[in-house]
Amino acid sequence: LLTGTVPREFLKFRSLNLNVVGNNITGFAEEICDSGSISSWMNGLVEQFGCDAILCPDGYYTDVGRQEEESVPCVECEVGTNGLYGATFCGAEKDDISELEILAEFYLAVNGLNWDETSGWDVMADIESPLDLTLPSYAGVNHCNFWGIICRNDTNQVKEISLPSNGLEGMVPPSLFDLPALDTLDLSGNELHFDRDYGFGPIGNAKKLEKLDVSSNDIQKFSGIGQAKALRELYADDLYFFTGLDTELYQLPELRVLHMQYSGLRNEIPKGLSQLANLRSINLYGNELEGTIPSEIGDLPKLWHIDFSENDFTGHLPTVAIKNLLDLEKFHVHQSGRSKEGITGELPSFKEQTKLHLLDVSSNSMTGPIPTNFLSGVEDVDQLMVIDLGWNSFTGTIPSELSRFSQMNLDAVRNQFSGVSSSLCTLSGWMDGEVGKIKKDGGNGCDAILCPKGTYSEIGYAKSGSNGECLSCVSAEYAGETTCNGAAENEEKKILDNLYAETSGSNWKKGAYWTTGPICTYEGVVCESNNSNTNEGIVELRLSDFGLIGNIPTEIYQLPKLTKVDFSNNVVDISFDGIENAVNLESFIMSDADLSDLTGIGNAPPSLKKIHIERNALNYSIIPHEIYSLENLESLSIGFNEFGGKISPSISNLKSIQEFWAGSNDITGSIPHSISELDDLRSLVLSGNRMSGSIPNGLGNVTSLRQLHLNGQRDFGGFSGPVPSLNKSPHLHDIDFSRNSLTGSIPNDFLASVRGSTVHDDYAGVSIDMSSNLITGAIPPDFDDFASLFLNLAGNKITNVPTEICDDDDEFMDGLVGSLTTNKCDAILCRPGTFTPVGRQTEINETCTPCSGGESQAPYYGSTECKAVSGERETLQKIYKLIFTESSDDKYWMTDNPICTWAGITCNGDDSDDEGVIEIDLESNSLVADDIDEVSKLFFSLPNLRLLNLRGNDIPLAMDNIGSATNLKLLQLSATGLRDINGISAATSLEELHVTENDINGDFPEELYDMPNLERLYISFNNITGTLSPRIGELTNLKEFYAYTNFISGTIPTEIGKLENIENLVIGQNFFRGTIPTEINDLVHLREFSVYYEGEAGINGGLDGKLIDFAKATHLRNIDVEGNKLTGSIPSNFLSGLDTDFRSSDDNEIVLHLADNMLTGTLPTTFNNIKNLYIDIAGNQIKGPIPQSFCSQSLWMSGKVGEFNSCNAIACPAGYFSPSGRQKEGEDCTRCGALEVAPFLGSYECIVGDLEKAALLSLYDSTGGDNWKDNQNWKDASKPICSWAGVTCKGGSLDNATVTELNLNGNDLTGTMPSAIFELPFLEVLNVRDNDLYMEFGNIEKAEKLDTLYISAIDVGSIKGIGQAKALREIHLTGNALTGDFPEEIFDLADSLESLFIAYNKFSGTLSKRFGELKKLKDFYAYDNDFTGHIPSELAQLENLQNLVLAENKLSGTINEEFSSMPSLKLFSAYRRLKPGPKLHGKLPSFSNVPQLEGLYLDYNHLTGTIPKDFIAASLGSELITISHNLLTGPVPLSLDSFENLNIEMEGNKLSGLDSRFCDNRSWMNKAVALYDCDAILCPPHTYSIYGRQNSTESVCQKCDEDPDVETTPYWGSTDCDVPIDEQEILELLYSSCGGNDWYNKDNWLSSESICTWYGIDCGEGTTVQAIRLGANNLVGTPPEEIFALRQLHTLWLHSNPLDFKFKSIERSINLVDIRLDATGLSDVYGVGNA
């Protein structure tokens, strides 16, 4: 269908074969046929025949459309060729096909058998080809009798085809347009397209076609429409162009009607519209057109109807152009859904239009007054005029000049009009007669046009009858107001203005009218309007790419009508806290933004169907479980984030999901089988993750699936296992499994339901990409059943491409199969022995290239290179299969990439090599080996290997074959689980060995002494015992020897002094004893020497004797002898041999760790020669003072001497102390107390005198000690303080110091606790609970060892300061009458706190997310406070938490599924037996992975759904589970039968079944099942017990009195015989009792919709009514007392209604918290006390 001319640009080709016959070419560019450079074209034929060799000219033809032989020239056609070049026939010489055959082809192609109406057509139900109609049996068929066919009377030719909404489906055959008399074609409301490009196909062949209706079909392009030259009417509504209006439309010179509503048109209307000179009507309603309304409409004088409404036009109306439209009758350009400012400027007068009677410019931004000559040219003043100017910014008054019209409906609300001319107030025919009616009733008739200033109504004007008047409103500044201050719009404005301020609105790239106009004019804001254009609320926020910065305020969730938000392409974040308030939200889009936290998204309303949050800052170890709770979600896009972990089986909860896009994350694991339960799933994209495992064949059972992308998994080879058949998904068109590790052959039934479909669109256009896998075998020959197919299998091991899929499948591989004349299968896969970089031929002239080595280098179909498999490749492939896991980084491993590009591999050549591996570095790569002998053998067989690093993997190599690795220089096997290194000495070339952090046991390996080439030996952190042999001296090449943290004992051998090259000698934290050998003084190259803490901190073992002088070492920079028993003074020649430049350099810090020995004497002044010294002498017996010269060494002690300008940075002087023995950041040297001493430099503490006694006496005197219950021995000077009642000391009761505990609970202490008590230096436990005592926490920071604090039931006022007690592990603060929010200061104890008890207080507010910081927390008891909001999921992340008690608070929301995976949890309590108000709701978590669970208390909440099948599955030690009195449904899962002993209370729910097998569990319910069978678990239906079960002889399950008309107690576990409450009946009774028919708002009431959608009704989980909000809604009469039977009702608002409310039966409403009856007719409050 190509059009136009052959372009001049082709002249650049010296030689060209051009075949464009059979198109709509109209000629050649002028230069072409005159050019001498094209003589070689068409294989030289152009030189003989000129351009006829390319195309026959207009009016000429040949059978092939061009001249190929001298004897067959282009022949003249007397009837012409319609101006086209390259004709292959002349007029009637074309094959004559009967109209019946054309209709038959049409019938077969567009699913005729399944049409809704087939009358007449059904004669063809059994034909297989149009040619069948030539058989004699069809001779009498008259196609003019077919349904929808109208023929000409004279010729019986088809004149009209009208088959709207008739179930037509597929591609219309081109022959339909060959019907010569066809002038009308209506195919609207079907699923048709005209060509494969979804354009208009060869519609130009229908030469007489005048009217075409293709609305609601699958047309997406304009191509071809310009050829329908006779077309007069085009109806193309509801299509999918999503592009601009195409100028090809302008090629329709006869067009009268252009009707394209809702067709996805975008951009500006292009120039050239004036070419449609005959256009009468243009309707472009409901598109996305932009720019200004083109002035070219003025060049279309025949236009009488224009509708440009609901687009995004801006600028002024083209006033001059409008003046030319003298026939204009209707003009529409309202834009209530616009995202920009809309039409601006003043209103034209339209005085030239004599016939205009309908004008709508509402919902724009027009300004200025109504012109006085407005509509002055209209001739018929008695016709009904419909004029809509509403929702602009017009000013002035409604002019008197309009009084000449007797009938007018004028909508002018929501402007800035000051009033209405009084001359209009008597025009009784205006406003549908309302002006006359109101005037007749004594009112001002003008009120029917606009409410005057100072008043308002919801519609902006008055109506006759009750409640139709304009209401007083002092803030109504203009006439025609629809709201008053305090109304919803003002609240919405506050929310939007806050959004503007919080996101740097003044710097937005867009945002017209946000600071000046009404909210519905704000750019990007879409409001809902009723028929009167009244703002019904904001429904959309379209703020994509506006330039927002910051945090979106969560107040947007309070916009009551909000349905869609789009914050994409902005630098913003948002919290989901409060999203449940956005009860109408359907779509949340925030792509390419800074969204960082999804907490709370699970509370989204049921209306939410779409979440697109790809490309954000989301970093989660797993996809949050909250996502899986969104059961109504239809589209979820979370790609390009950092979600990790496995996809939960809970994904099956997303029952409505159609699109799940999670590509390019870090998701691991396999695809859960439960995903196949998603019946509506159409598109699944998991590409670019780290997933593995097999692809579940169950995906093929998802019949709606259309797209499945699993390609490019980045770890462990991706998906493995066989290719799934996917044989039950008839619509699956788009599959990408590329770059994985799928194996086996392609199943013969692969996509069988697609290939076998009778619907063309199912089996055509299929794309399958399974390249770069490990697939073997042949391509199934049945792939020939596809109509068109793009198949990529390159980079596999395919052994055959059947010829049948290459023979006649011209449309395969984008048509390339049909274009090739030889080796057609190469378009699918290159033959063995050939290759291309993509494994197939992609162009006609670019064939597959032969390999020099033939099939040995490319043995399979689809090779992407020529190569032979190297031996090293085979070795690495075997290693891969033996040790790699799904968590390993295996980039390029097992691909066809050269092995030298594989992750961790280095070769001696470049990356293009496939051999020469010299280094393997796979450190910390999650590798695991089962066959360790085979793995070891493979590694050591690599002939060139020099370096092998397997650190941090579970690969404890065996050394049996290490001798094969003759070039191995470095072996890194630290942290691999090694138990021995037997055989290591065979590695004769080894220079560096790392085996730290392993489990090497036994004596120091003797083999190491046989490795003279060793230069570096690292063997620390093992369990090596025995002694160090004198043979150590044989390793004379050794430079580094690290053997610290083992169990080596004995003395350090003197032969160590023979290690003449040693630089680093680190053998600390062993069990050496004796002295440091003086031979070490001879090690002149020594740079580091460490023997710290030999023995158990110097107690068992440890070095003694003198400190050697190291006087020969020239560059020694680190000596560590800390924690031994060295004695004597520091030698005066200590380090005297240091190189002068070395010790004088600022950059060379010399570190001496001499602390915690028994050194004496003073510090040698020779240290002054060292420029940069760090020396630790604390914990010795060195006397001061420190030489004064040291105090000016500003670089010493890492610069602290200079920073503090004090020698205290070296060591605290005598009489002072600090925890480190010196001054450092945040730690000063503190003077000892009056009774304390510290005689040496660097003291850690002072020796205590009488300080403790003084503190105890202060406590006694301050708290009425004489009146204590027990004050035995207190103040008795003859008794040690450790014998005083309640005092515990380290040394027992006979000691007189080191107080560790004070236990004075319930001892009648009164007064104020003195802060001196916190100065007890050894105090660990303070217990003063249950006293009449006041306590503050000032000075508590001095109690540095305080571990446990019992201060329950005393007066603490507040807990300010408690966070300074950094060692606190346990706090008891129960019953202290504390109020306010949870104290943030508690989180300052995150490093120590394990137990926190705050029950029986009055804390309120929400529980902080900071609980996640308390990593050590084991116990949190917060029973009976007033906390509200959700239980933070951060509590579920505390791995050490054992007891979590939150019962009897006011918590609500759902319980996060993360609580189902807590390894240490024993007790979870959150019941609500006493306190009213919103409760916990949503699904009951499974708690399936809580192995320590003993108690679970969730009774008296609003939990819904069924009990999970895996409920408490791992909790075999559970003692009591209470889930009673919720809203649980379904049967008790039989999986619980696996528990031998279980007490589970489930009464008061809506459980429908209890399997009889439970009755055999005789140990259940405290062995009550053994006595009462299943009644001990739950009373059966139609019976009850006060406990819902039998637990004694007095609680028997009794039958209820049966009423044949009422089903009582239909569930298991009933606690009474009450008839189940029908909440709908109660609400219907409220409606009928309170005048529901006259309520202002009664949306959905009494409808078939769920009661939860009824206006004013809020439900919890399980469609249970929780709130009724019907304030100011015209309720009258007395509400029925049955309203109090709504058991979960917590909010009842009936304010501002003329009601006579009564409180009778209020006691039944046990959860009622909030009742509002202000401004009603309430006459008494009798009975309210029973609430």
Image (spheres, rainbow, N blue to C red):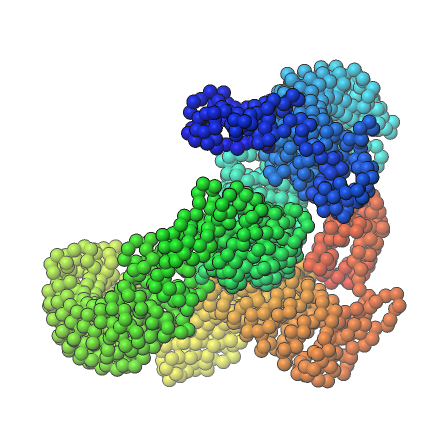
Choose between 275 and 1618: the one closer to the eye: 275
Choose between 854 and 1480: the one closer to the eye: 854
- Position of 1183 with respect to 1713 (left or right) is left
Q: Is residue 415 above or below residue 1321?
A: above
Which residue is painted at 79% across and 72% down in the image?
A: 1581
Q: Quadrant of residue 868?
A: bottom left
- Position of 625 with respect to 204 (left or right) is left
Which residue is painted at 74% across and 43% down in the image?
A: 132
Q: Give the x, y percent position of residue 803.
A: 54, 52
Image quarter where the C terminus lies is bottom right
Q: Give the x, y percent position of residue 1378.
A: 56, 63
Q: Give the x, y percent position of residue 15.
A: 43, 31
Image quarter where the N terminus lies is top right
Instruction: Note whether residue 104 is visible.
Output: yes
Choose between 307 and 1139: the one closer to the eye: 307
Which residue is painted at 43% across and 29% down in the image?
A: 40
- Position of 1478 with respect to 1327 (left or right) is right
Q: Which residue ends up furthest to the front in the rendered image?
A: 71
Q: Is residue 506 above or below residue 1031?
A: above
- Position of 209 with respect to 980 (left or right) is right
Instruction: Note whether residue 1281 is visible.
Output: no
Q: Give the x, y percent position of residue 969.
A: 24, 66
Q: Is residue 1543 above or below residue 1382?
A: below
